């Protein structure tokens, strides 16, 4: 048990500036841990799996004839990481892992906001509106985090393009059958 909590503490510690970023990270008083790729990748993997599961359950409430499909949502989450890495690696250079950690926290926030809706039983219209509000909150948080990382709108534009592409693909595959 001690080992587990020690590893959990390390996971949170090494990713704390991605979980709760601050504009004062560049000051002398900033207490920023060394970068640890292993813990960043574990954090990203955790968020991907957790988000894929919650999204697979939530998608059934949207009323678009979508079944609970963990693999579909997992593919979308992994696709987001690949998309952002491919399109932003040259632009972000050394900040790519900080950006990916922050982007995963935005996804985690959105996922956590979807959980209360899973406990309710309303019409599909409610869930579509609720999902739209969550996506808007995620967009605003993504913009805020990009500003803290001193990035322009390119990561957000790429993030939105992926979301639109994934949505179009899901709609096409759903209504094709």
Image: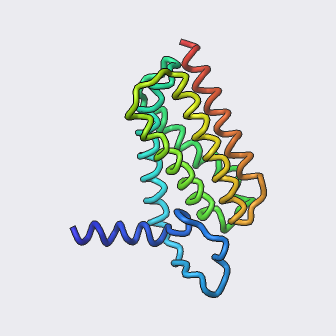
Residue at position x 40%, y 26% in the image: 121
Residue at position x 69%, y 65% in the image: 148
Residue at position x 59%, y 67% in the image: 21
In the rendered image, the vertical position of residue 118 relative to residue 105, given as above or below: above
Q: Give the image location of residue 64, x and y in percent.
A: 53, 19
Q: How is the image coloured?
A: rainbow
Position of the N terminus, as image quadrant, is: bottom left
**Is 63 on the left or on the right of 120, as rendered?**
right
Residue at position x 64%, y 42% in the image: 136
Nearest the viewer among 162 and 63 is 63
Report the residue that reaches farthest toward the left: 1
Nearest the viewer among 8 and 88 is 8
**Is 47 on the left or on the right of 6, as rendered?**
right
Q: Give the image location of residue 27, x and y in percent.
A: 66, 83
In the rendered image, the vertical position of residue 176 relative to residue 137, given as above or below: above
Q: Quadrant of residue 9?
A: bottom left
**Is 48 on the left or on the right of 158, as rendered?**
left
**Is 27 on the left or on the right of 79, as rendered?**
right
Report the residue that reaches farthest toward the top: 177
Q: Give the image location of residue 70, x and y in percent.
A: 42, 34
């Amino acid at each position: 048990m001690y080992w587990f909590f020690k590893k959990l503490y390390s996971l949170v510690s090494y990713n704390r500036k991605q979980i709760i970023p601050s504009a004062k990270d560049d000051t002398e008083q900033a207490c920023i841990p060394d970068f640890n790729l292993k813990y960043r990748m574990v954090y990203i993997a955790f968020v991907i799996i957790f988000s894929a599961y919650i999204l697979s359950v939530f998608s059934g409430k949207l009323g678009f004839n979508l079944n609970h499909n963990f693999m579909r949502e997992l593919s979308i989450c992994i696709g987001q990481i690949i998309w952002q890495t491919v399109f932003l690696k040259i632009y972000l250079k050394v900040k790519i892992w900080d950006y990916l950690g922050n982007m995963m926290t935005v996804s985690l926030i959105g996922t956590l906001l979807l959980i209360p809706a899973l406990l309710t039983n309303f019409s599909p219209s409610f869930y579509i509106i609720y999902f739209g509000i969550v996506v808007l909150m995620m967009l605003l948080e993504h913009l805020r985090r990009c500003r803290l990382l001193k990035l322009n709108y390119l990561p957000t534009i790429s993030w939105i393009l992926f979301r639109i592409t994934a949505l179009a693909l899901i709609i096409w595959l759903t209504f094709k059958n």
